[in-house]
Image (spheres, rainbow, N blue to C red):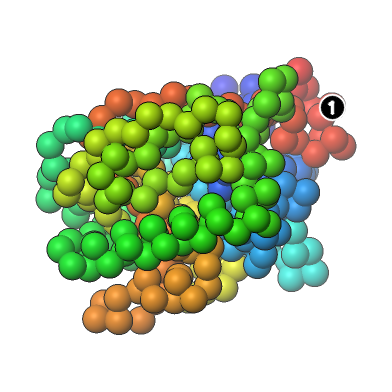
């Protein structure tokens, strides 16, 4: 394929990669618009899939969209472009969160691009216990460097600081499952039979830690049918905290880009991940997640890392379903 030809096959590949990104409650709160004259893909917020109770300021929505932008960037590089990403390009259009220009060919073929592209399809959130050895220090250093390259910081607290963060997460989880309004909103994202390909399928719900140490999100508390039996989780979990210098919508998008880049590099190393986002959903808890000894910054995501089963794929909308209706005549099925 001519690297400058944005044809239907290339567009479907790009959008399929974008929607494989993680999103809060698998809400997939994005849609895309194409400007064929400038070969620019606009990435827009889909506000009807926002979580007004859990995410009233749209921070998690922006992180989700940022993750999709990273996947778009990787897929574009694999197809031969040198994509140019602009975040929040037009202040008069608040739902236009990013633009990805595809009008320049790449003059370098990076080996890592193929690895990252392959990882897009293998990356899954894993809510079950990790059973393998500790993540090697060299890999953690690579993940931290990956975050720095995307204007974010990734640190790996241990000992008392790790215990403190897990306790904050447990407190947030307790609040989430006992607050009727939040429980109702979370329950609405559990998929039923014949549901569209977004939201959380019951098969993706994970067990709770029998020892009570690992505060996994307990969807069974908001979806009563049949709680999963408890399981024994790792006693020395590897927890990462992703922070950004600022806390604006642009920083949230950068956090999503950094998060997905980290998750893809982890996947290349066969490391699994799940997100411990509960404390980020309560402003007063999120503020004290940050360790002041680490300098200024704003916590955006807690990530649990380890070795274990790959996890089940999560349903995703098809490329035509996320493209603006005006652009669906481009040739997608």
Name the residue nearer the viewer: 160 or 91. 160
Image x and y of residue 124, in percent: 42, 32
Determine crowd level at label 1: few under 14, some 14-19, many 20+ residues with C-alpha closer than 10 A. Answer: few
Image quadrant in which the N terminus is located: top right
Q: Which residue is mark 1?
A: 329
Identify which residue is drawn at 60% across, 59% down: 179
The answer to whether residue 158 of the structure is visible from this angle is: yes
Q: How many marks?
A: 1
Above/below status of 332 relative to 297: above
Per the image, label 1 sits on a secondary structure element best described as helix
Residue that appears at 49% across and 76% down: 284
The C terminus is located in which quarter?
A: top right
Q: As displayed, is residue 101 above or below residue 189?
A: below
Q: Residue at x 70, y 52 (%)?
A: 50
Compared to residue 249, the image places residue 263 above or below, namely above
Which of 177 and 51 lies nearest the eye of the viewer? 177
Q: Is residue 62 visible?
A: no
**Image coordinates for residue 272, horizontal then vertical, percent:** 31, 36
In this view of the protein, which residue sits in the foreground, 149 or 169? 169
Give the residue displayed 78% in from the left and 49% down from the top.
Answer: 48
| Left or right: where 133 falls relative to 238 | left
In the image, residue 115 lies at what x, y percent?
34, 32
Q: Position of residue 231 (x, y in %)?
A: 30, 33
In the displayed structure, does residue 124 sit left or right of residue 105? left
């Amino acid at each position: 394929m001519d690297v400058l030809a944005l044809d239907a096959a290339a567009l479907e590949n790009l959008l399929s990669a974008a929607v494989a990104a993680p999103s809060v409650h698998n809400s997939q709160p994005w849609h895309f618009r194409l400007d064929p004259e400038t070969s620019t893909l606009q990435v827009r917020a889909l506000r009807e899939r926002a979580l007004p109770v859990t995410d009233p300021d749209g921070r998690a929505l922006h992180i989700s969209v940022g993750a999709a932008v990273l996947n778009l960037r990787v897929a574009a590089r694999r197809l031969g472009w040198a994509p140019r990403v602009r975040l929040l390009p037009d202040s008069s259009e608040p739902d236009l969160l990013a633009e990805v220009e595809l009008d320049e060919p790449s003059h370098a073929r990076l080996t890592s691009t193929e690895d990252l592209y392959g990882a897009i399809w293998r990356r899954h959130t894993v809510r079950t216990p990790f059973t393998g050895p500790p993540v090697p220090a060299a890999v953690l250093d690579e993940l931290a460097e990956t975050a720095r390259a995307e204007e974010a910081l990734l640190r790996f607290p241990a000992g008392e600081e790790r215990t403190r963060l897990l306790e904050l997460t447990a407190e947030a989880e307790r609040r989430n499952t006992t607050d009727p309004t939040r429980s109702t909103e979370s329950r609405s994202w559990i998929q039923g039979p014949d549901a569209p390909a977004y939201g959380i399928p019951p098969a993706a719900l994970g067990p709770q830690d029998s020892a009570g140490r690992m505060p996994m999100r307990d969807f069974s508390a908001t979806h009563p049918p049949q709680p999963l039996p408890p399981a024994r989780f790792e006693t020395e979990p590897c927890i990462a905290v992703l922070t950004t210098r600022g806390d604006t919508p642009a920083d949230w998008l950068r956090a999503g880009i950094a998060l997905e880049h980290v998750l893809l590099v982890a996947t290349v190393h066969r490391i699994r991940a799940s997100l411990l986002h509960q404390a980020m959903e309560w402003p007063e808890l999120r503020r004290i997640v940050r360790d002041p000894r680490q300098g200024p910054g704003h916590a955006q995501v807690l990530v649990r890392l380890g070795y274990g089963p790959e996890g089940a794929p999560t349903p995703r909308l098809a490329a035509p379903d996320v493209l603006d209706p005006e652009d669906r005549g481009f040739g997608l099925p």
